[in-house]
Structures are given as C-alpha cells and as structure tokens.
Amino acid sequence: MDVFEFALKMEMDGKAYYEKLKDETDIIGLKTIFTNLAADEQKHYEIIQSIKAGYAKPMTDTTVLEEAKNIFEKLMNDKNIVGSMHKSLDGYQHARKIEADSVQFYEDAAKKENNPETRQLLQKIADEEKKHYNIMDNLYDFTLAPQNFLAWGEFSNLKEL
C-alpha cells in the first residue's frame, strides 16, 4: 500500500470513528463537535485524493477548534453532562491516539515530499490534525475534571476525630 492509499484509509477510518462517537452521545454539543470533526476528515480525504490524482485541491482552514471552544464553554455550565460523558472516556482517549498518530504521519510525509505545494498541504493537514487532537484532549480532560480535584487527593487520607 502506498502512502496516499494509507492516508485515504486513515481519513475514512477517522471519519467513521467520529460518526460512531456522534451516534453514541445524546449531548447536542458533542454531536456537533463530532460532526465537524468527521467533516474535516472527509475534507482531508478529498485533498489526499487530489494530491494522488496529480493536482492539489485548495484547502481552507478548519473552524472546528473555535466552534468546539464555544461548545465547551456551554458544556462547562451544565454539571450533569460530565456524568453522561464519562462512559465515553475510552473512546475519547482512543481518538486522541488516532489524532496523534495522524499528526506524526502527515509531518513525516511532508518532510519526505519533494513537491513544495504537496509538502505545504501535508503540513497543513498535520496542523489541522493537531487541532483535532487538542479538541479530544480537552474533551478527555473535561470529562476527568471531577476526578482530578486537588483537594480530593490531598485530603483523602484524613479521618474524622
């Protein structure tokens, strides 16, 4: 399998995974985040297809990170949401790994690419994958936040007198 075929498969797998996460949640804000991430993966797929076909399809910057920030702000105001998100923690962690692997893959491919236009597109995809990682990392941390309260560990060994 060549690099482009691998990248195409990776993007379709990422899209399918985000669609799966979207279908598994009842939280409207998360559905929006996962829908946007899946759309970005589709966009990356189309760009890789164009590179493989010998022309470079122009790439617009993603707005998924800015939109996710707004959604996170709304989610933070609803304390009941975290409990329902906790069941998806492993999924968020897996998505972080997928995105980290994608970043590494595209950065390596960009370094090896001789065509400056293709190299620039590959680096731009890597930059977008970093944004995806950032979103999933924040989602993971947000879900764990109640467990990571400082006083919990500091005072957990105290007994009543």
Image (cartoon, grey):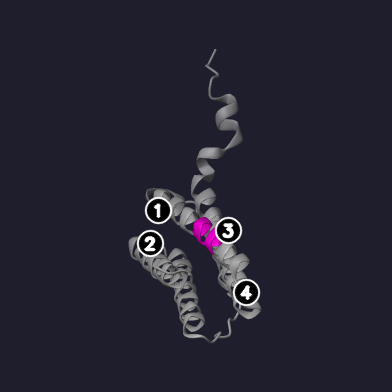
Mark 4 closeness class: few <14, some 14–19, many ≥20 residues within 10 Å: few
Task: Verify whether residue 51 appears in magenta.
Answer: no
Distance, label 3 to label 1, CA atoms, is: 15 Å
Identify the residue at image location x=59%, y=81%: 60
Nearer the camera: disc 4 or disc 2: 4
Number of marks drawn: 4
Could you tell which of marks 2 and 1 lies nearer the N-terminus? 2
Q: Which residue is mark 4?
A: 114
Nearer the camera: disc 4 or disc 1: 4
Could you tell which of marks 4 and 2 lies nearer the N-terminus? 2
On residue 134, which mark appears? 3
Query: The C terminus appears in which quarter of the rendering?
Result: top right
Nearer the camera: disc 4 or disc 3: 4
Identify the residue at image location x=62%, y=78%: 115
- Helix, strand, or loop for circle 3? helix
Residue 106, given in percent of the width and then of the height, sits at 55, 65
Q: Is residue 65 visible?
A: no
Q: Which residue is mark 1?
A: 91
Asked whether the beta carbons under mark 2 and mark 1 sit within 8 Å of each other, the answer is yes
| Stretch of the chain drawn in magenta | 99-105
Could you tell which of marks 3 and 1 lies nearer the N-terminus? 1
Query: The N terminus appears in which quarter of the rendering?
Result: bottom left
